[in-house]
Amino acid sequence: MLKYLFAKNEDIPSGSAAIFFGFSAIIWFVIGTGLGSFNAAKLAFPDFVTGNEYFAFGHMRQVHVMAVIFGWISMAFAMAMMYITPALGNNKLWSEKLGLWNCFLWNLGLTLGLTVLWAGITSGREYSDFPWPIDLYLATCVFIPLGINVWMTILNRRTQGIYTTNWFFAAATFMVIIVFLIGNLPEFFHLTGLTEAYLTWWFAHNVLGLWITPVAAAIAYYTIPKVTGNPLYSHRIGHLHFWSVVVFYSTPAAHHLMSAPLPEWLKSFASVEGVLILVPAIAFVSNIMLTMQGKWYMFVENIEVRFTVTGCLMAIPLNMQGGFQQTRAINWYIHGTGWIVAHAHLALLGFSTFLEVAAVYYGIQSIMKRKLYSITLANMHFWLLLIGFTTYWVSMTIAGLIQGAGKIYEVPYIDVVIAEHPYMIARWLGGSMVFSGNILWLYNMWMTARKGTVVPQGRLPHELAYER
Amino acid sequence: MSWNFDKPLRTMCDSATNEADKVLWEKEDLGGITEDNNRLPVPIVLLVILTVITAFAVTFPLWGQRPTAEIYEGYIKAMSNPEVLAAKNDQEAMEKIIQLNKGKGHDGMLERHPVTMDDLRIMKPEMEALMAKGVHMDEYEVVGDHVVMANFEGNKRADGTVIRKQPWWDKGYLIDIFYLSYFFIGVTILIKRLPPSSWQPRHNH
């Protein structure tokens, strides 16, 4: 990477930024899930690694969360943007050099941010845990350069129209900058009390709703038509999806604070919008499923399609949970329990991860023009991720319901802890399966880059998946 | 941008624009990806309608609202009732206060949010000051040791009175109806600016 950082833009091979982002994302995924597995072990076995404050759960939890969100998920998004945006505009990335600097500064900033978090220096605001200088760094050195590269590539496209995926990419890279700058105002200006609480959850909700959800969906809009060769079922449904994400996802911050002393009208408004999150979900799932018509055999045969369709199907339980768990009638029961942890993992480790994994698989093979090193390892990766995640999600959902009952019926805390113990072990096992799967994935992609069979000109890697 | 409102549910574009759009749609290659022009399937439309109805229906039972200071107004007044003052201890005093306030419209909320005499003593000075001012106590909530404005709505006049107070059932719902209406009208217009869904592109032509 270092030799390209100071090279002329035209001397940098196309796709370099995407490749560096792709491998960075996988490495952060291994680190993030490794930390998650370690943290889960501490919850399952309270005597595991004690006596050192740096390995205390309170120090490590947010390092895991931020590594996964801003390392794995966001870098996989950047990887997808670096190769999909120009592909859809029939042009090249506006600046490979900017992309590489972006990747370098991103890794540097994230490493710094996670180090200070690990050291215990934190804003104490969930999902925006980084201290404000790191927030400013991420906005200026990570998201603004990413946005500039995406917007300029779209503006310089050689097509007249803009495909659905690029609407989402352009909008999300703009919205995430706004979310970062406004959502962190409490830290920049030391706002406290309800203003801080409200903006904290406005940030947290919109990092999910205006960054992770739309970009993950945008990737599926590319992967499925590209790999299956089918036209996207409906441009119209794409419109409904895009605008409903922008309109309904941006407003429900207050539904995270249903018991707070906020105006009840604001909570109800947010709660209605919270249920209406189902509108983009319905549009998205139906459009992708209908695009699959006549190509369902690829769900079995093709690794990218399998990951994408699985992620897409996960949007159904994800949005059914998300839409209803925030209403007053349900929130009083599950608020502050493991149910929410399960839901967050369904969004990040289920829905969005499965869609991004497909983009990284496809991107690395098609940019490097190399066939996947081992389809067996890829299949193992899929099943370890799916079984591991499902084990995690189911166990944490049950644990959350137990906690909810304990909370409502005022069961002594230690009794709830004892009742949850088997589910905490299942959580650790599930998380460890995901971690193991990711180590295999890193090896497989590394070997694909080093030793994968070269794909002949005019062929696509997935067409050759089962050919020797 | 030319408009045609002859058949607004079919298309809102004139035929020349539609023809140009069709040519572009069929000709353009977006990185090897093409798109069809299928309408929203009827079950999907029904599902969206059902979602909107559900969104209002499931949030409307306002059970679970945070209690306002208004529900404790009667308790604070009852603290100076001779019967309560004559009580032997706090427990008896609280029982009498609860008895005196039965059937005054907040039974359910008071049952779900019980307080003790110590709580009432903490609340009393700030509650009485607000009651003396004649403010709407339903706009205030008890947060920790303080009674603070939290549930405000509408614009206020210089004297502190509210220009318009929403009916009890409207907790953000009218705003939501407007918001949703703008959204659906906007998206419908956007979609109806496309060539009619009876036309499908012949890809690679």
Image (cartoon, coloured by chain):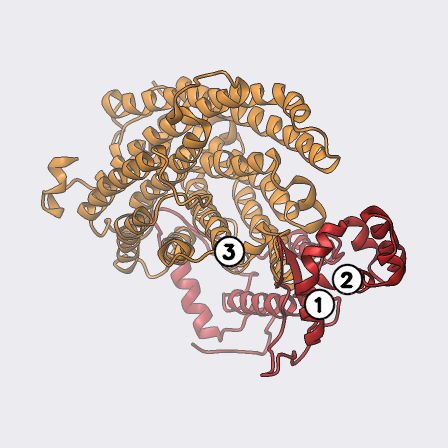
Chain colours: A orange, B red
User: Residue A21's x, y, as percent?
Assistant: 28, 37
Q: Nearer the viewer, residue B62 or A210?
A: B62
Q: Is residue A407 visible?
A: yes
Q: Residues within 10 Å of mark 3 (few under 14, many from 20)?
A: few
Left or right: residue B88 versus residue A425 is: right
Determine whether the residue tagged by mark 2 lies in a helix, strand or loop. helix
**What residue would you read off at disc 1?**
B128
User: Residue B141 or A223: which is nearer the viewer?
Assistant: B141
Residue type for callout 3: Gly
Question: Residue A422 location in percent, x, y?
Answer: 62, 18
Q: Name above or below for residue B141 compared with residue A33.
A: below
Where residue A361 sits, quadrant-wise, is: top left
Q: Give the alpha-carbon distance from disc 2 to disc 1, as whole Å.
A: 8 Å
> Could you say which is closer to the camera, residue B61 or residue A369?
B61
Residue A434 point in image, percent of width and height? 46, 24
- Image height of A434 relative to A217, above or below: above
> Which quarter of the picture shows residue A75?
top left
> Mark 3 and 2 residues: CB-CB less than 8 Å, in contact?
no
Q: Residue at x 57, y 55 (%)?
A: A254
Circle nearer the viewer, 3 or 2: 2
Residue A47 on image: x %, y %: 50, 16
Residue picked out by circle 2: B76
- The residue at the point 38 percent across, 30 percent down is A29
Question: Who comes first in sequence, dot 2 or dot 1?
Answer: 2
Q: Give the crowd class for mark 2: few <14, some 14-19, many >=20 residues within 10 Å.
A: many
Host chain of mark 2: B
Q: Chain of mark 3?
A: A
Residue assigned mark 3: A193
Task: Check if mark 2's residue and mark 1's residue have beta carbons within 8 Å.
Answer: yes
Quarter of the image with the N terminus of chain A in it: top left
